[in-house]
Every structure is written in structure tokens, then in C-alpha cells.
């Protein structure tokens, strides 16, 4: 699978595909000279449907046009620490002139289990998700209880 996001609706689709993806913090990288933030995650394949335990696949995710990165409640200096991605949200700068948006920038927030967040200040939404490996059987299907 390969998906791209250029607006908030596209980003919601990426978010749904990445819900419950897990990865080590050492596989997250901010590349300031390239204005890129990238990570590699083990993505749960929600698109398979609801039957059985399902499967996971190794996937690469990157955001371009990244101007800065900040984190909150994320353990720094622990590359082996595992985090689970719950959702990706976009907060627009919301600058318009008349009825025309003149600033497509904002903050993309990667919301992690346990209350951690990684915030990407971006010029605009420009993201890509690509599966890197074939699937393997998941140990268990992620559960969220009654929401």
C-alpha cells in the first residue's frame, strides 16, 4: 500500500491506516536540512476487516515541509523505547484573506498512547505512507474497549 496526504481529509485517512502502529523511538528521525520528519512503524492492517487477529506490516511514513519538531511526554534518549501511534491530527494556522486560505501551514500532531505527542510545524500538509514489507500474523488485535 502507498498513500499520500496533501490536505486534512487525506491526513485522516493516513491516521486511520496508522492507528495502533508501533515503533521504536530510534526509528523516528527529524532531518532539518531536508525539512523532513520520517519514521518506520509496524502498522496493524485495519483494512483486512474485523475477523481474526489480523496482520502487521513494516511501513515508512514521512512528512515534508517540516519547519520544526517538538515533543511532549516522549522519553528522549531512549531509542529502544516503543511507542504506539493512536492518531494524526492537523491544526491549521487558519490564516485567510477574504474566503481564500493564504497560509496552508499549521501543526501536525502525532498522538501517542500514554499521552505523548510529537508536534510537527509544517509549511503545508505533505505526507506519504508506504508499506515496506510483506505482512506477518499479528500477536493480537488492538482493542480500545467501548468508545
Image (cartoon, rainbow, N blue to C red):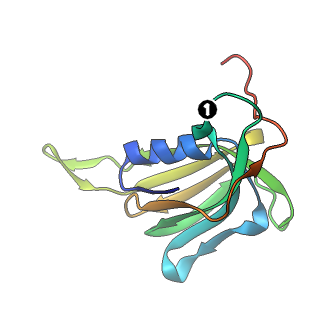
Side of 140 where 144 appears, left or right: left
User: How many numbered callouts?
Assistant: 1
Side of 32 where 55 appears, left or right: right
Side of 138 where 16 appears, left or right: left
| Residue 80 percent location from the top left of the image | 86, 64
**In which quadrant of the rendered view does residue 40 lie?**
bottom right
| Residue 63 percent location from the top left of the image | 50, 64
> Measured along the vertical axis of the image, is residue 132 above or below residue 112?
below
**In which quadrant of the rendered view does residue 124 lie?**
bottom left
The single residue placed furthest to the top in the displayed view is 146
Report the quarter where the C terminus lies: top right
Within 10 Å of disc 1 (Cα), the crowding (few <14, some 14-19, many 20+) is few
> Measured along the vertical axis of the image, is residue 129 above or below residue 51?
below
The single residue placed furthest to the bottom in the displayed view is 33
Near-viewer residue (67 or 12): 12
Near-viewer residue (34 or 51): 51
Near-viewer residue (93 or 65): 65
| Residue 56 percent location from the top left of the image | 72, 49
Q: Identify residue for label 1.
A: 49
The answer to whether residue 87 shows anywhere in this view is: yes
| Residue 5 percent location from the top left of the image | 41, 54
Mark 1: secondary structure: loop
The answer to whether residue 116 shows anywhere in this view is: no
Residue at (47, 42) in percent of width and height? 12
Residue at (38, 42) in percent of width and height? 9
Amino acid at each position: 500500500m502507498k498513500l499520500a496526504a496533501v490536505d486534512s481529509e487525506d491526513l485522516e485517512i493516513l491516521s486511520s491506516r496508522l492507528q495502533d502502529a508501533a515503533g521504536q523511538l530510534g526509528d523516528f528521525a527529524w532531518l532539518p536540512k531536508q525539512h523532513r520528519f520520517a519514521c518506520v512503524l509496524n502498522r496493524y492492517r485495519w483494512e483486512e476487516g474485523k475477523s481474526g487477529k489480523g496482520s502487521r506490516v513494516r511501513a515508512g511514513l514521512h512528512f515534508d515541509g517540516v519547519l520544526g519538531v517538538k515533543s511532549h511526554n516522549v522519553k528522549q534518549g531512549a531509542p529502544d523505547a516503543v511507542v504506539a501511534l493512536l492518531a494524526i491530527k492537523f491544526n491549521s494556522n487558519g490564516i485567510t484573506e477574504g474566503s481564500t486560505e493564504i497560509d496552508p501551514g499549521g501543526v501536525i500532531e502525532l498522538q501517542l498512547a500514554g499521552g505523548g505527542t510529537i508536534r510537527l510545524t509544517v509549511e503545508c500538509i505533505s505526507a506519504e505512507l508506504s508499506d515496506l514489507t510483506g505482512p506477518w500474523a499479528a500477536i493480537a488485535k488492538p482493542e480500545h474497549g467501548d468508545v
